[in-house]
Amino acid sequence: MKNLGLFAVVFKKFRPQSSKPEEKNLPNLLKQDFKAQTINQKWVADITYIHTLSDGWCYLASIMDLASHKIIGYEFSRSMDSKIVTDALHNAMLSQGTPRDVIIHTDRGSQYLSSSYLETTDKYNVRRSYSAKGNPYDNAVIESFHSILKKEEVYQKTYLSFEQAKLALFEYIEGWYNRNRIHGSIGFMTPDEFEKSVA
């Protein structure tokens, strides 16, 4: 490779680090019950990372409704701070007509324990629920979505910039996942079709 002037492309593995001490006595209202009787009853949320060549690691915060499996709110940002999760929640509330008494389940990441997130969930009368420490199965459905997103979209492409990745994620979520990708768990309907059928 050296003689031919070839170089390997290496991506530094992203390793998130918690800057917040462990919080105890956080309620787990979901308890791995991922079935919902109606839309806007149970939401799950998480953050994943997306690499771009010019802007480095960027972050996607997503919120899914467990009844429809629809991504009802999301935010893409260069920073993994509390603003990304509060913006995603604002977007979810806006898209769903500001429902009340929704359970929103997350992991114990510092963003979901921040004062701004707590204030935003209180403002919307959202019931906070948290995974047990170190138990990814407690939030398996939204983690599964992020895995599907990466297999079907992110790992298939190289994003040159934050803006290019943002457009691609919008097209995948809004153009494909919510409106065209069928799910066996909701009667082989798309999330958008299912939501409309029960609204």
Image (cartoon, rainbow, N blue to C red):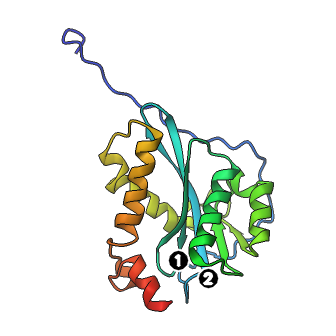
Dot 1 crowding, Cα within 10 Å, few <14, some 14–19, many 20+:
many
Q: Residue at x 18, y 12 (%)?
A: 4
At mark 2, the secondary structure is: loop
Q: Residue 28 lies in what quarter of the image?
A: bottom right
The one of 44 and 88 positioned closer to us in this rendering? 88
The numbered mark, 1 or 2, whose residue comes first in the sequence reads: 2
Q: Do the residues bearing badges 1 and 2 touch, measured as CB atoms within 8 Å?
A: yes
- Residue furthest to the left in view is 4
Q: Residue 40 lies in what quarter of the image?
A: bottom right
Q: Residue at x 64, y 58 (%)?
A: 87
Q: Is residue 62 visible?
A: no
- Residue 188 in percent (x, y) is at 32, 82
Q: Is residue 109 above or below residue 118?
A: above
Q: Residue 122 lies in what quarter of the image?
A: bottom right
Q: Residue at x 78, y 62 (%)?
A: 118
Q: Quadrant of the N terminus?
A: top left
| Relative side of 175 to 114, left or right | left
Amino acid carrying label 2: it is: Gln
- Residue 58 in percent (x, y) is at 52, 42
| Residue tagged 1 | 66
The one of 182 and 19 positioned closer to us in this rendering? 182
| Residue tagged 2 | 41
Q: Is residue 12 visible?
A: yes
- Residue furthest to the top in view is 3
- Residue 198 in percent (x, y) is at 48, 91
Q: Is residue 190 above or below residue 78?
A: below
At mark 1, the secondary structure is: loop
| Relative side of 116 to 135, left or right | right
- Residue 148 in percent (x, y) is at 38, 60
What separation in Å lies between label 1 and label 2 (alpha carbons)? 8 Å
